[in-house]
Image (tube, rainbow, N blue to C red):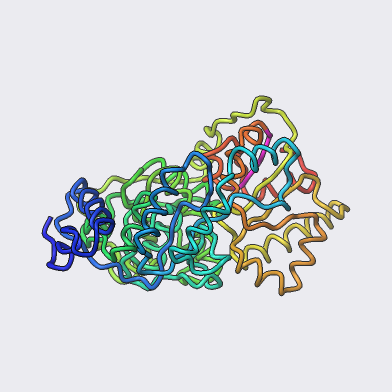
Amino acid sequence: MILTKEQQAILDGEKGETLSKVMKTLVMYGEAFGAEKLVPVTSKYNHLVTSFGLKVMSPVYDLMQQLLNEGVKSSQKFSVDPRPLDKNVPANFLQKFVFNKFMYTKQDFYEKQLKELGLMSDDAFTCTCYMDEMGNKPQRGDVLSWAESSAVVYANSVLGARCNRNSGIIDIMGSIVGYVPYFGLLTDEGRKATWIVKVETTKKPEAQLLGSAIGMKVMEDVPYVIGLDKWIGNELNDSACAYLKDFGAATASNGAVGLYHIDKLTPEAVDFGKDLIIDNTQEYIIDDAELERVQNNYPVIWKNPDATPKLCFVGCPHLSLEQLKSWTEILENKLNDKGLKKITIPTVFTAAPKVLEAFNKTEYAERLKKTGVITSYICPLMYMNNPLCKKMPVITSSNKLRTYTTARYYTDAQIQEIITGGNK
């Protein structure tokens, strides 16, 4: 790898042994992917994926402490993925005991380390750090050092920033020295589409289901999606961005997509169109039958497939302000049509702390509360990591949560029906 004088000086230890080790790690990481140089991180803020104080993550805490002991801090302030615990989220005595005494015993200690290292604020915990309310929205062309898969794919695709799907800890290392290896999605060539996906459904496809189908088909490749603009328009408004947030999270977790282009909608597709597509691409046609096939092939890993759901999570990744408002109206109408006052299954809507703060200032907050829905800032995935929670029949409209846990997937419409007294 060719380094600048400044980069070589850091590697040679002129700024201390600790920074030298950080630089060496980034160089080795880059060389593993064929990177010939490092480029500056240009975003105002960074984002870390490791937010949870699991006892078994002692190497992470040791590394963070070594950095702090040497007086090393991130060159950028940063946000971090959601907290794993919230006392308002339903859990029985034994589940809480496991959470607090065995799993997240280092949470307070780790959060103290994060604050010393450069955490943006006490409530900068979310997987959707790019929400306007959170204040960590990269600009087009910004080079990032992120690792959170759903945030990386959103930043690359919807915002036009540039970031590889880095691993945890690499995200903070890139921010500390201010450089990341130049390869993959940072390069013009690496952002070219190698798949053409044609959406030929007769109705608006479910975002999480469409993203899942594409992710499982193209894996880590870059898809160019044609036909979706028919259903979500040609403007990146709140509705389209919320759709693409959920769509992208599914492509990233059900596959390994770090960038997608939506014809006539996402920034690079608008500017360059089909010039983004390489020659001899593969093609994938998605119609109603294909989406039905994909959903029907999801495994149900509940011990009793016919069990009545005991908990529902909506918001993985975290919901937007407009989604919270929309869900409130939908549930009110559903309950009213069925002559019910409250939902029939305990349900948690998760969103970023700042989004919840904004939501709580609207009339919708009290209206949603009356339906019985609980709002929280937690990561549902971290909740489901509890072995006792894994045994629960939990339902969700998140394909990311379905992929990583025992939660069972249903579309938004199906969830709305189930939690208002319908059959699963």
The quarter in which the C terminus is drawn is top right
Q: Is residue 184 left or right of residue 51?
A: left
Q: Magenta stretch: give its range.
A: 392-397
Residue placed most toward the observer, 165 or 212: 165
Residue 202 seen: no
Residue 380 position in % (x across, y down): 60, 47
Q: Does residue 27 sit above or below 130 in this rendering?
A: above
The quadrant holding residue 4 is: bottom left
Residue 10 point in image, percent of width and height:
20, 62
Give the image location of residue 324, x and y in percent: 66, 63
Q: Is residue 139 or residue 116 the one in the foreground?
A: 116
Relative side of 254 to 18, left or right: right
The residue lying at 45 percent from left, 43 percent from top is 58
Q: Identify the residue shown where x is 81% and y is 46%.
A: 344
Give the quarter of the figure containing the N terminus. Answer: bottom left
Q: Nearer the viewer, residue 222 or 45?
A: 45
Q: Is 229 covered by the magenta stretch?
A: no
Nearer to me, 422 or 25? 25
Residue at the spot x=18%, y=54% of the render?
35
Would residue 133 be found to the left or right of residue 153 on screen?
Answer: right
